[in-house]
Amino acid sequence: MIFGLTEAQIAGFGLTFGVGAFILYMLFIIGHLAWESKAGKFGTFVIFLGLAFGMVGFLAKYLIQWVLNIK
């Protein structure tokens, strides 16, 4: 136990908030990439669709777990 938390609690916190913060940072990087390349509206959409599609799966996993835990 570290600071009164178990290893599973620390891992769950890191996975939820640490990866969530990393996703936000990656969205910033993708937006900056689109801005610097002057991609336009459609180009920016394609960049976000291609690079951020994997993040949707990570977020969907938590949404599905939340829905299943309600019942």
Image (cartoon, grey):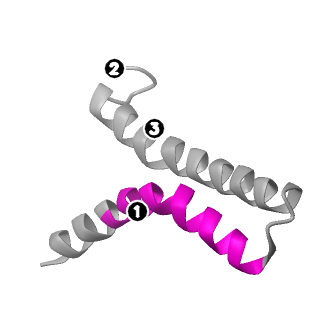
How packed is label 2: few (under 14 Cα within 10 Å), some, or many (20 or more)? few
Kindly identify the amino acid type of the residue bearing the numbered disc 2: Met
Number of the front mark, 2 or 1: 1
Q: Residue at x 52, y 51 (%)?
A: 20
Q: Would you place residue 39 above or below residue 27 in this image?
A: below
Residue at the location (85% across, 61% down)?
A: 35
The reply to whether dot 1 and dot 3 touch (C-beta < 8 Å) is: no
**Magenta segment boundaries in residue numbering:** 41-60
Checking the image for residue 1, the label placed there is 2
Q: Nearer the viewer, mark 3 or mark 2?
A: 3
Specify the label residue 59 is tagged with: 1
Location of the N terminus by quadrant is top left
Tell me the SS state at disc 3: helix
**Residue closest to the eye, 13 or 32:** 32
Q: Amino acid at mark 3?
A: Gly
Q: Earlier in the sequence, mark 1 or mark 3?
A: 3
Q: How far is the residue under mark 2 from the one under mark 1? A: 29 Å
Q: Between marks 3 and 2, how big is the CA–CA gap?
A: 15 Å
Check if residue 45 falls in the magenta segment: yes
Instruction: Report helix, strand or loop for mark 1.
Output: helix
